Amino acid sequence: MKLPLIKQLNTFIEENDQDYVVEAIEVLEHLSEVPSLSEGELDTIGELISNMYGALEVSREIRNGVPRKEAMNAFMQRVLGSIDT
């Protein structure tokens, strides 16, 4: 997960609507089923999907009243914690 990408996606969600990100995830998931994609291409699509889901999670926390910086930090701590285990 890349924090700058998640920040950018959150800015997009704030300025537009999270439905665009949800629909983009659906398109990427559908594209990932193409049998001729290389492993590198699948990795790239997977990374994009992961960052988009992360941005949606951070956006939900912000809508629930958590300050943006705190929501971002808490999310990244959860990600890092899941990697350590």
Image (spheres, helix red, strand yellow):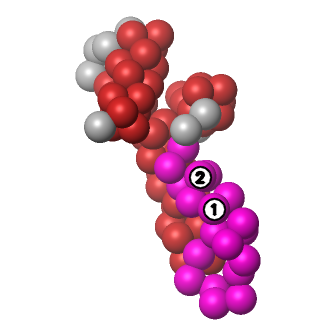
Q: In the rendered view, would you say 56 is above or below 38?
A: above
| Residue 65 x, y percent position in the rendering | 29, 14
Q: Quadrant of the N terminus?
A: top right
Residue corresponding to mark 2: 47
Tell me which corner region of the image, top left, top right, bottom left or bottom right, holds residue 27.
bottom right
Q: Quadrant of the C terminus?
A: top left
Q: In the rendered view, would you say 52 is above or below 11?
A: below
| Magenta-tinted stretch | 32-51
Q: Is residue 78 magenta?
A: no
Q: Is residue 45 magenta?
A: yes
| Residue 26 x, y percent position in the rendering | 50, 67
Q: Is residue 12 left or right of residue 55?
A: right
Q: Residues within 10 Å of mark 1 (few under 14, many from 20)?
A: few
Residue 7 seen from this side: yes
Q: Residue furthest front?
A: 85
**Residue at the location (61% across, 33% down)?**
2
Q: Residues within 10 Å of mark 2 (few under 14, many from 20)?
A: some
Amino acid type shown at disc 2: Glu
**Residue at the location (27% across, 22% down)?**
64
> Foreground residue, 53 or 79?
79
Residue corresponding to mark 1: 43
Rounded to the nearest whole Å, what is the CA distance between mark 2 and mark 1?
6 Å
